Each structure stands twice: as structure tokens, then as C-alpha cells.
Amino acid sequence: MTFGATRAVRDVSFSVEAGEFFSILGPSGCGKTTILRMIAGFLEPTEGKVLIGGKDMAGLGPNARPTAMIFQSLALFPLMSVWENIAFGLEARGASKAERRAKADELLKLIALEGYGERMPGELSGGQRQRVAIARALAVEPKVLLLDEPLSALDLKLRQHMRAELRSLQKRTGVTFIYITHDQSEALAMSDRVAVMSEGVLQQVAAPRELYDNPQTAFVARFVGETNAIAGKVQTAADGMIVLDTPMGPLRGRGQGLAVGQAATLYVRPEALMPVTGQGNAIAASIERVDFEGAFALAHGRFEDGRPLVASIPSTRLADAPKVGARADFGFAPEHAVVLGDG
């Protein structure tokens, strides 16, 4: 998809299964909303096709597609009651008032707002308005519900609550959800599969656990969750394991398709690092601060080459937490680290 001389989306191809909760994850400006608008029919792709249920959507506008879209702003009508907001799309399709009211009441029950039909949007909380917007989209019985960062305006607690509600609602209705977000935890918590985007390019499509444990590109490794990155050159490569020559000595992790002498980076998650002494796969760091988070503490520091370190230490092992200002050694199991090429 191009806008003048700007190519917003490049060679992106993926499929979404019926009834799937599918998220497109990436930073601002990566092309994810452009993809959503092409699916919805607000934009026509410069090249390629959008197929829904095997049918080419070329030439069909938003009203002619089996989709409904929820925007960040929700766009509820402030002078219409809740039930009228929900039934608005049905009125445009010629449904009678009795049919519209019956459908609205059915959906209000589904979203746990039974009895709220006569209220105005301004009388509802942020989470309740969110649910009304979802009910309005579901009223027209779309095959695909498109959601463009719908939780971004909510506070943290409400976002976490609404994640669970959205996931539960999607499973109860069986409607296919395509969800846009820049929030990694949101995508990992709710999705069956996640597509990670960067600068208009699709980096990886996988289940959340697969993305987290087995990133295929350096961007995915760095963007999806916290990680520690240690640069070096491939010393040996055999049987799916790589030994990387680094400023901290040889380190071993999982890796494929890398040649001896190639520049690469080892990525290891904070929770995979544990304070150790005199053990292989050990890395040293100077500790700058230790943040207590309740169930765990995060030790922040610097490797010897100046790169940042973060290690997660469970509360049950806080006695082993390194002291601020001290030099500490951390170890990790090779199977908990992945080595990826830099180019």
C-alpha cells in the first residue's frame, strides 16, 4: 500500500482463521492501522487482494463488507440512548423499532449491561461505553470485527479488566476479531495468534508463547517483552545450538542458519537470568538499582560493554538479589536463550 512516494505496507500476506482472535502488533507508524482500513474497505490496496470467506473484496465499500469496525474514539452518539446506539446499524438496514429494541436488549444482556438501555452514553463509565461500542458492532452480525486500539484511552486497571472481557466476549460469540495494538502485553494476553509489524514489513506471525520463546527476527526479540541483548560473533554452530564469542566470553544459546564468524546477538529474558557464581553461560554486570515489584524484583544494571541488563528475581529468592553498586554474575540455561543474526 502506497501513499504518494511513501510505501506504508510492503509485501504483507497472512490469513486469519474463522473464530480466531488475531492481533496485529507494532509501534506507531508501522502500517498496522493501514492494514485494518484495507480490510474494512476504507482503503483499496495498491497491490494484492483482501479476501473474506474466500471472496475478493475489491470494489466493495465498508457498508458492503461483512465487517464492523470499532475505533479508538468509540464514536457513540451522545444524544441517543444506549439501546438506540446499539441498534443504529439495524435502523439503516430497515429493521422495525421492535426488532431493533429486541436485538439491543439481547446484546445488553450479552455485555452484562442489562437494564441500561435507556441511559445516555454520558452516564456510563469508560468500560461500559467500551462494551456498548462492541455491542453496536455486533448488532449487524459481522463475520469479522475490526478493533483499532480500542483500549488505549482507558486507565491501566480498566484496560486489564477489559482485556479479559473482550476475550471472553469473542469466545462466546465466535466472531472473528482482528485487533490492532502497540501494547505487547495486550496482544499476548488476548490473542490466539499475533502478527508483529515493523516499518510496513510483517516480521513474524505466531501464537503468543511462540513469539515470546522463539522470536525469528531481532526486532521481534527486542519488541515483544523485555530482553537482554549481548552482541558477538558465531564461534561454533551445531545441532541447533550456537556458541557466541562475546566480550564476556563464550555464551551458548539456541540458533539456526548462522555461519561461523557471522555477527549475531544472543537474547535472554530477564526471568531466565539467575544470580550465580563460577558457572558456564555466566555474564557479569554492575548493578545500578533494584526495583521491588511485589512478586518479583527487577535488577537493573550494565554489562561490561555498557549495554543495559535487567534480571527478574522472584520474591522467594530476594535474599539472593545483588546489591546496588556491586558487580554481580548471572547465569542462564542455553535453551532459554536464542541467537539471531544481526543482518
Image (cartoon, helix red, strand yellow):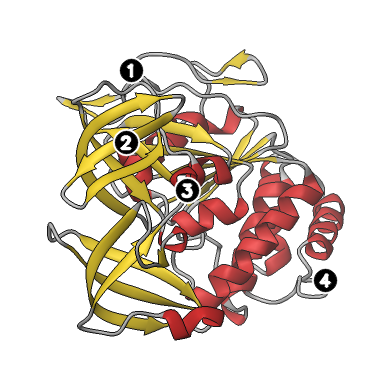
- Looking at marks 4 and 2 on the same chain, the residue that comes earlier in the sequence is marked by 4
Tell me whether the residue at label 2 lies in contact with that at label 1, contact meaning CB atoms closer than 8 angstroms: no
For mark 2, what is the residue?
243
Q: Could you say whether the residue bearing mark 3 is in a helix, strand or loop?
A: helix
Query: Which residue, given by chain and number where applicable, does mark 3 sit on?
Result: 336
Q: Which-is-in-front pick, marks 4 and 2? A: 2
Going by the numbered disc 1, the residue's amino acid type is Thr
CA–CA distance in space, label 1 to label 4? 45 Å
User: Residue 166, located in which quarter of the rendered image?
Assistant: bottom right
In this rendering, is residue 37 above or below 99?
above
Q: Secondary structure at mark 1?
A: loop
Nearer the observer: mark 3 or 1; the answer is 3
The amino acid type found where label 4 is placed reads Glu
> Are dots 3 and 2 in contact, CB under 8 Å?
no
Q: Position of residue 233 (x, y in %)?
A: 20, 34
Secondary structure beneath dot 2 equals strand
Q: Are marks 1 and 4 in contact (CB under 8 Å)?
A: no
Q: Amino acid at mark 2?
A: Val
Q: Which residue is mark 1?
A: 46
Label 4: element kind: loop
Q: Residue at x 59, y 56 (%)?
A: 189
Q: Amino acid at mark 3?
A: His
Q: Position of residue 193 (x, y in %)?
A: 58, 39
Residue of label 4: 114
Residue at left offset 50%, top offset 30%: 39
First in sequence: mark 2 vs mark 1: 1
